[in-house]
Amino acid sequence: MSKLVRIANGAGFLGDWLDAPRRLVERATVDYLTIEHLAELTMSILARQREKDPAAGYAEDFLDILRSLTPALKAQPQLKIVANSGGMNPPACVRAVARILSEAGLGGTAIGCVSGDDLLPRMDELMAQGCEFANVDTGARLAGIPQGALVSPASAPRSPTPQSEIRNLKSEIVSANAYLGARPIADALAAGARIVITGRVADASLTVGPATHEFGWRWDDWDKLAAASVAGHLIECGAQVTGGYNVDWQGFDLTDVGYPIAELAADGNAVITKPPGTGGAVTRRTVAEQLVYEIGDPRHYLTPDVDCDFTTVEIADQASDRVRVSGGTGRPATDTYKVSLAYRDGWMASGTLLVYGHDCREKAEACGRIILKRCELAGYPLARTNVELLGFGGGVPGAWFWRKYQTPGELVLRVTAHDLRREAVECFARQFAPLVTSGPAGLAGYAAGRPLVRPVYAYWPTLVPKSLVTPQVDVRPAKEWCA
Amino acid sequence: MTHGKTICVRDLATARSGDKGNHANIGVFANDEDSYGILCSRLTAVRVQTHFQELGVTRVERYELPKVLVLNFVLYDALAGGASRSLRIDTQGKLLGTSLLDLTFHANAWEENDQ
């Protein structure tokens, strides 16, 4: 039988089910366990943590996961781990991982650190070399970011951005990371790493790296790289391909959902499955829906490794909870890396109240008006605000068929505000509790306390030439990383 | 307009949605070839944009994946600023797929479901 490489995914984002990786490797034998911890805005949150503490800025959940995996690492010599949990600080993550492994008697384990994605310290140098970091959605240049908090309230998003209101926010950038590809991961594995910790790496590359290393593909084997990217894309969101996020949720129990495994063949085609005896399901439906999850043009799913065509993919049931995915095709990768950049964009808070009674709709709208008007009276008119009536079609404004139904007897009022001035949003957050005594009867939910005022990091998708970014790979035994 | 058979997208397909910056996408997976054919002819980009017009969607692009019976809709500017800046409870467009399944049509023509 020809070689198969079994690549599993135990987390689809930072905050995913902490027990899933351990439960996965306890019930299935896999060659690689990948951990995907970085959503679009996770990097800016981690960047803030690193600002406060130079030893922080990585996904600390990974340390809990790793502790739970040390028995499996001892019992299963084939098991390797590839995680992008390094976030904004891969070396700090690697050192913490090395300490855990050393304490567990695994000090000889080789750990690879992949970095070089962090462009923040290099912004001046890169801009001097001609990088404009234009926004790929809007075409706007970084030097002219619209004064976000003063434009287009959510309730009227069609109003145009006044081009006169411009601020140069280069100094407001909190994170700028290139999405590196599979190659540094494969290089780390080739250098003997059993655990590879990366910063910002494209999600699918967490799978393509091990596959390319195992099968010895060339970096211009476009169809194989594309086929493996399809598998990586399918498992990158964890349980979403094994029954999670399914509208047919009543068809199976998700309590003990099995996290996904891609069994890759030497041509890159794969069977998607999950550990036996686990909850959830792997069907043509769960796989097909996940194939197009959060993608644009399916003919051009761009990764740092390859330009994939998803329209050539075929999906077929092979057996119970085994679905074969084949036929992904690829074209040469582009000469740029996608960059995830975030800049400070003021402050935001959301408060909720339960509004009860036959008149709850009108009453909730009135409460929303009172809250916002009292901010104005305090001298803080807010740049962007939104009033939602949850339980009355507020989840998707205008699109639900709720108008067919009678007004409910209760609903949740949610009011949100965004402004560049922290003190304005703090004023807003103080307007909920006074409604206890100075608002209408039939309100509850004050016990949750004053709404939290949190910083906003606006997302700025852009590109950087690959020639200006050099991925770094450093592989050493755990006990050396500790030293 | 109540005569004739009423069909819901939910009878023909399942769906899931997500975010990409300030844009959202909805993947619609047809139950079978016949359902896929009906959806291709009736669930147009314009119809989807109308359904979500209050979100401020500026454009809808529809992509067909006939081999896997999937339509992929990309809803531009649907998310009021995207995951970080949106003031809505559904910052990432997670509800849009479920909402799209509520669309209904009669035997011969799409009909507004909420009037």
Image: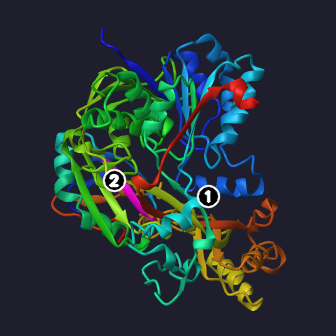
Query: What main secondary structure does the magenta stretch of the protein show?
Result: strand
Q: Which chain carries label 1?
A: A
Q: Which of A260 and B97 is in front in this view?
A: A260
| Comes first in the chain, label 2 or label 1 | 1
**Element type where label 1 sits in the image:** helix
State the image coordinates of residue A416 (x, y, percent, origin top left).
64, 71
State the image coordinates of residue A121 (x, y, percent, origin top left).
61, 59
Q: Examine the rendered structure and indicate whether residue B78 appears above or below residue A15.
A: below
**Quarter of the image that includes the N terminus of chain B:** bottom left
Which residue is at 43% across, 33% downward? A209
Residue at mark 2: A335
Does A25 lie within the magenta span? no
Mark 1 neighbour class, 10 Å CA radius: few under 14, some 14 to 19, many 20 or more? many
What amino acid does circle 1 point to? Ser
Q: Mark 2 lies on which chain?
A: A
State the image coordinates of residue A148 (x, y, percent, origin top left).
55, 78
Q: Examine the rendered structure and indicate whether residue B75 appears above or below residue A273.
A: below
Position of residue A355 in the picture relative to residue B49 (left or right): right
Q: Nearer the viewer, mark 2 or mark 1?
A: 2
Q: What stretch is highlighted in magenta?
A: B22-28
Q: Examine the rendered structure and indicate whether residue A472 appears above or below residue A218.
A: below
Q: Which mark is residue A125?
A: none
State the image coordinates of residue B101 (x, y, percent, origin top left).
36, 53
**Quarter of the image that includes the C terminus of chain B:** bottom left
Which residue is at 34% across, 37% downward? A230
Which residue is at 35% across, 30% downward? A283
- Asked if residue A345 shows in the view, the reply is yes
Q: Residue A44 carries which label?
A: 1
